Each structure stands twice: as C-alpha cells, then as structure tokens.
Amino acid sequence: MGEQRQRIEGQQTIGGVADAAACPVPYSLSKSRGYSLAFASVAVALGTALLLAAQNFRGVEFPLFLMANALTVWYAGFGPAIVALALSGLAFNYFFTQPFHTLYITREDLPYYVVFLLFALLLTWFSTVRRRIERDLVASRDALQKEVVVRTQQADLLNLTHDTIFVRGMDDLITYWNRGAQELYGLRADQAVGKRAHELLRTRFSISLDDIQKELLLTGRWEGELEHIKADGSSVVVASRWSLQRDEQDIPVAILETNNDITQRKRSEEEIRELNRELGKRTVELEAINKELESFAYSTSHDLRAPLRHVAGYAELLQKNTVSVLDDKSKKYVLMILESAKRMGNLIDDLLAFSRIGRAESRKSMVSLNELVREVRGGIAEEIAGRNVAWTIGDLPEFYGDRSMLKLAMLNLISNAIKFTRTRTHAEIKIGRAEGPPDSIVILVKDNGVGFDMKYLNKLFGVFQRLHRSEEFEGTGIGLATVQRVIHRHGGQVWAEAVVDGGATFFIALPSV
Amino acid sequence: MSATLGRILMVEDDPRDTELTLTALEEYKLGNEVIVTRDGEEALDYLYCRGAFQGRTTDNPAVLLLDLKLPKVDGLEVLQQIKSDERLKMIPVVVLTSSREERDMVASYKLGVNAYVVKPVDFYEFVNAIKELGIFWAIINEPPPGSIQRR
C-alpha cells in the first residue's frame, strides 16, 4: 500500500497499459505528507481540546482525537494512522487523564484506551476496505479506459478505409457509421446513428428481406446487391456483405454491413449488354442482307443466264440459216450479238464466282504454292501455245489456307501477266518470294507487260474497274478484285507497282503461321 | 412410231430452251427420241403412265434430262420421287440446269443424280453438251432392263 501512495492522485495513463495493482489511488497522499497529516491532525485535535478544556468544556477531547485518527486513516492510510493513534493516545494520556501531565495510566482509565484503540482499529479497517474497493474501481476504470482507447483506435482504422461500413442492431438501428459510409451516402455519423438503416437508405432488395434474414441467421453472413438512395436523392448500387455478431449466449446482437459502390460497374455492364443487343440486331440485319444477296446471286445465276443463252442460241441459229443471204454488214451485226452475249455470260460467271468467295466457307489445309503455280500453268498452257514466254519460278513456300481460293488468286495474277505481255515478243514472267515483314510470306508476280499508270492504283483492285480499253485487252474487271478478296479473307494484303509500258509487279503478303 | 414413246424424257418449262435442245439433238437425229414434259407433275405423270400418258407402254425412258427450276413440282422433288421408287430408281437422271450453285449440286448428288450439267451460255458449247449427253445416255450407255428399246 505504501507504494501506491507514492503516486500523485489524478495521474491518468490513457493508452498506457499499466498494471491495475500499481494504479495510484485518488485522494491518497505521499508518504511524508501522510505522516505530516498524522502529526497535524493530532496537533489540531490536541490544540482544540486544550482550548475547549480551558473554557471548561469537558469530554470533547475523545471524539476530537477520534476525528483526527479518522481523518488520517482516510486520507493518509494505515502507517500514518498508527502514528496518529499513538500520538493521540499519548496526548490523551498526558493532558486529559489523571494524573495529568504524566504518561501514567490509571486502572479506571484503561477502558477508555481499549475503546479508543478498538474504535481506531475499526476505522482503519473500514478505511482499508474502502481503499481496496476504490482501488478495484480504479483498476476496472483504467481497464475500461484502455479498452476504450483500443476500440477508438480500431474505429479510427475503420474510418480510414474507403469501404462503406456500418453496424446496426437487430432492430435495424444504426450504431456505428464510418467515414466511407459518410462519403458514399452523404450522411454524417450523427445523422445516421440511431436511425433505421433500411428507412434511412430506402434500401431496395433484389431478394426478399425475409430470405436474407434467414440466410444470415443460418450461416452468419449474406452477400448480394442492394440499391440505396443517397442523401442527395440519387441512387447507388452496392455489393453488400452482411456479417452477424452474436454474444456469449449465441444471441444475435448486431449486423456489420460492408458496402462497395458498384454503380459504375453496373452501368458499364448495362452499356455492354446494350451494345451486345445492338450488335445482335446488326448481325441479324447483316444476315438478312447476306441472305438477300445470296438469293439475288442465285436468281442472277439462274434467271439471267437463261435469256442470255437464248439470245446466243437463236443468234447462232440465225447465223447458220442466213449465211448465204445476209450481206457482210448484217453478218457482222449477228457476230456482235454473239460476242456481246458471250461477254455478258462471262461477266455473270465472274461476278458469281466473286460473290461466292465472300460467302463460301473456307476449307483450310497446308497448300504448296509451288504445286499451285504448276497446276495453274498447266491449265493455261493451251492458251499460250505459240507464244514466247520466259518463266522464272522461285522456290515458293507452303501456306495454310483454302486451296481452291488461293488457286483462283494465283490463276488471276498469272492470267493477267500472260494477258498484258501479249504485245511483247519476249514475255518475261517471274514468280517468287519477296522481302517483307518477318511474320508474313510475301510473293510477287512480275511481268514485262504494258504496265499501268500508278495514279490509277486506287482503282486497280475495284470490282468492274479496268485500266485498259476492252478492244486492247479483254476482261471483266473482276480478276484483281477477286485476288484481293481471297487474300483479305486469309488476313493478308495485296499491292502492286508498275510503270506505263514497263511491266507490273503484284505482291501478295500472307500471314505466316 | 407412237407419239408417247421416247427414249429421252426431257423436263423443261422454257420453250426456247426446249427448241434449242431439240435443235442440238436433231443434228444427231435424236430429236424423235425425245418426249418433252413442261413441269415436274407432267414428268411424273409420264413416268407413272397416268393423266395424259395413260395407256402408254410402261417401259422407262433410257435417260431423264431434268431442269431444276420448274413450275408446280420442281426438279429436286421429281428427282427425290424417282430415286425413292423401286420401279423408277434405275432410270439415269441428268440434271440440266442454269444453276451453278453449290447447294443445288450438293442436293442433287445427295438424292442420287447420275450427272449434273450446267447449261453453257455459249451456243456452241451448249450444242456440244447436249449432243454429248444425248449420244452418251441414249446411244452409248446400256440402259437398265425395262427401258424403251431403240427404234
């Protein structure tokens, strides 16, 4: 106990983790002051008793000394109380019991001393009990303070997070509201605490509250999406997590609700859904257009060819039957009809072949371009019989693609080279690899033909675009468009270089796999 | 010579195509061998000896030249009917059409067509194609038993 009294009263150690037993007791005095109090109180009691005795008041000295002792034991503790008791006894004996001014105790005075001693001991005992109770109280108060500090720190930490966290009782009354909640809902803690959460936030549940409560009681937690209304009236969609707190008796006491604002995410999701819907609609429209095109191509194939065949057929019969009666001019007219019909037939065929490239499913396999070129050359051998063509065929790679489509592209390029070198006495055609980006295969087809003007390059690969007059070089203007379409379908590129009357070079670049 | 007898049964709705085809076949004196029906229904009537063709001998033609686009019953339906009938399935059927469409070709072969010929626009080619067809199917090819014999 002496150690406790060394501490000065009122020295609170908030946040310090002090041992409860070492805690200072309020109202207790330091050791020296305690003994001073003992001396002073006994001295005051003695002085007062002597003064009163001088005024002939008798019998007050005993309670006065008791008061001095009580005061000392109350404020200064056990040690000073013993001192005060001894001093009081001596003073009482010396001044107030006969024989006066001696320390001799007569027999009849003995009960006084015994009662005095017992009374003083009783006081001391009461005081000690009081002190113990007081110490316990202080200890528990300090423990409580410590707890408060820790809790406050935790609450401060919860405030640091940007997540929205609040706690509500089983009656839905909010008991805790962090800064994240204030930021999200625009409501301060003092505006929220004590209010009913679902009323305050006008919660809209995606599933019924009963189901949520059921799950919460069963598993102790619930997760889902909720819609809340902020203080400014705007709505917010949150990903909500609820955790149930139970006390020692396992009775639910509170719900911790953590919410994350997913309004933006929901909006983006909705936008994506909307875009997908739009895309789906466009796809359906495109499919419809494609179907229409397909049926158009089909009827073109069927319906246009029949009358054309008839024009050609009857013109042919006319030519045969009138060979002896028609003059040269009329014969030429019939010939023109036949030629035109044939040209139109070719146009329709080419156009259909071109549209088929766009529609046909590609069937991919490893294709040897060397083999392909060999086949194409074999197919046109008859056409170039009698012409002087010098071929330079380099080593060509293999490529993963649609064989028939690639063959069509090569056929068109090689036929073009043959066609546009027709005016040359020595036609030179070179097919080989060319330099290109590392992840692609580049092939060139070069001729020494009539070439073309580079300013018309943009028209070169267009459908029905021709850079030569038809009486110079026949053609439908579909060939290079077909080449481009085939190469594009393979994810490649086509381009060309040429000089008027100086030959042309066509490049196709295919992505290497 | 009976008007209802022919070794080549042609199903063609367009009279111009019919005329041109007959002209082409005539060069090989095959014109008289041809019976022309104008749609799928008439063709089936001929094959089943019913309607206008009641009372013809029940022998099958040596070859059937079939257009695909026909009024009433179209070519593919006629083909399906023929190839699913035990009595008729042996008749060689040649589809002769303007359509170069892959789906028509695939559908025809799936139904068991014997040949598929796209009518060439060019008259020479057309005549040649018809002539070759006529010669092959009506002269060179041995028709299945039960076919109308050559006159």
Image (tube, coloured by chain):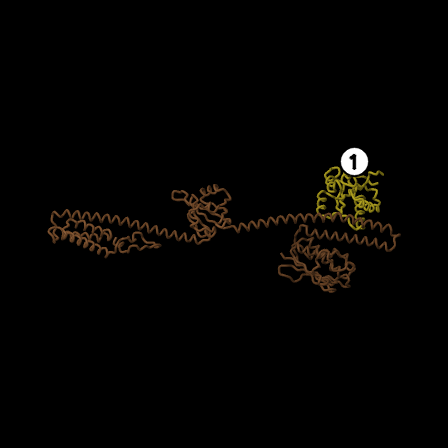
Chain colours: A brown, B yellow
Q: In the image, A140: left or right of A329? A: left
Q: Is residue A139 above or below residue B143?
A: below
At label 1, counting other C-alpha atoms closer than 10 Å, the crowd grade (few under 14, some 14-19, many 20 or more) is few
User: Which corner quadrant holds the C terminus of chain A?
Assistant: bottom right
Residue found at x 50% / y 45%: A204
**Residue B115 visible:** yes
Residue found at x 83% / y 50%: A316
User: A379 and B27: which one is in front?
Assistant: B27
**Residue B12 visible:** no
**Which residue lies most toward the top here?**
B55
Rendering coords of residue B72 (x, y %): 75, 40
Q: In the image, A232: left or right of A492? A: left
**Which residue lies most toward the front here?**
A55
Residue at mark 1: chain:
B
Rendering coords of residue A90 (x, y %): 15, 53
Q: In the image, A333: left or right of A24? A: right
User: Which quarter of the figure has residue A486?
Assistant: bottom right
Q: Is residue B20 above or below residue A429?
A: above
User: Dot 1: what SS?
Assistant: helix
Residue found at x 17% / y 47%: A115
Rendering coords of residue A466 (x, y %): 74, 58
**Which residue lies most toward the left here?**
A99
User: Which quarter of the figure has residue B84?
Assistant: top right
Rendering coords of residue A57 (x, y %): 15, 50
Q: Amino acid at mark 1?
A: Gly
Q: Residue at label 1?
A: B51
Q: Tell how many labels.
A: 1
